[in-house]
Image (cartoon, rainbow, N blue to C red):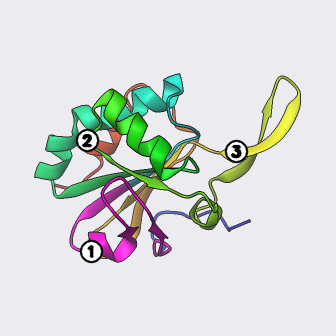
Amino acid sequence: MADTLEAGDKAPDFSMPSTSGPVKLRDFKGNYLVLYFYPKDNTPGCTNEAKDFTALADAFEAKGAKIVGVSRDSLKKHENFAAKHELKVILASDETGAVTETYGTWVEKKLYGRTYMGIARETFLIDPKGTIIKVWKKVRVKGHAEDVFDSIPE
């Protein structure tokens, strides 16, 4: 289990297949990067979160920010999810779990008294030099995309 990442930490490198081809942290050098982790494609909260980021995608782009959503779903599931909901965000597939572990978002969860491992809904805002400038833990979907947008320096 990774230590908890915080603002001021160097963002850990990553390499994953995505809906726009392979993505690595260095691909975003010179841009802000919104790296958001979510549990599963086509579930209500995850769908709303992706749609909210998509609705603001052009505004994020205007601020020099790229958006990448990460889950352990397969690339094929991501492609179907993106097509079904007309998503404008990059969806990266972390099937091995290496990135979710590195970012500390693979956590023990409880539901109806059952304990299991899953992805915590968390977002990392990374500056153009690769430093984490803000972390959102235990994200509530409603208003989250707007909050992240407002946190990107002008």
Q: Are marks 1 and 3 in contact (CB under 8 Å)?
A: no
- Residue at image position (47%, 51%) is 75
- Crowding at mark 3 (Cα within 10 Å: few <14, some 14-19, many 20+): some
On the image, the x and y values in percent for residue 24 come to: 39, 72
**Closer to the camera, 71 or 6?**
71
**Closer to the camera, 57 or 74?**
74
For the residues marked 1 and 3, what is the alpha-carbon distance in whole angstroms? 29 Å
Image height of 109 relative to 63, above or below: above
Bounds of the magenta span? Answer: 10-34
- Tell me the kind of residue under disc 3: Gly
Q: Earlier in the sequence, mark 1 or mark 2?
A: 1
On the image, the x and y values in percent for residue 23 come to: 37, 67
Which of discs 1 and 3 lies nearer the camera? The answer is 3
- Crowding at mark 2 (Cα within 10 Å: few <14, some 14-19, many 20+): some
Name the secondary structure under disc 1: loop
Residue that lies at the very extreme toward the right in this rendered image? 113
Residue at which label 3 appears? 118
* Quadrant holding the C terminus: bottom left
Is residue 151 shown to the viewer in this render?
Answer: yes
- Tell me the kind of residue under disc 1: Lys
Is 71 left, or right, of 82 in this rendering?
right
Name the secondary structure under disc 3: strand
Q: Earlier in the sequence, mark 1 or mark 3?
A: 1
Residue at which label 2 appears? 88
Residue at which label 1 appears? 29
**Closer to the camera, 76 or 109?**
76
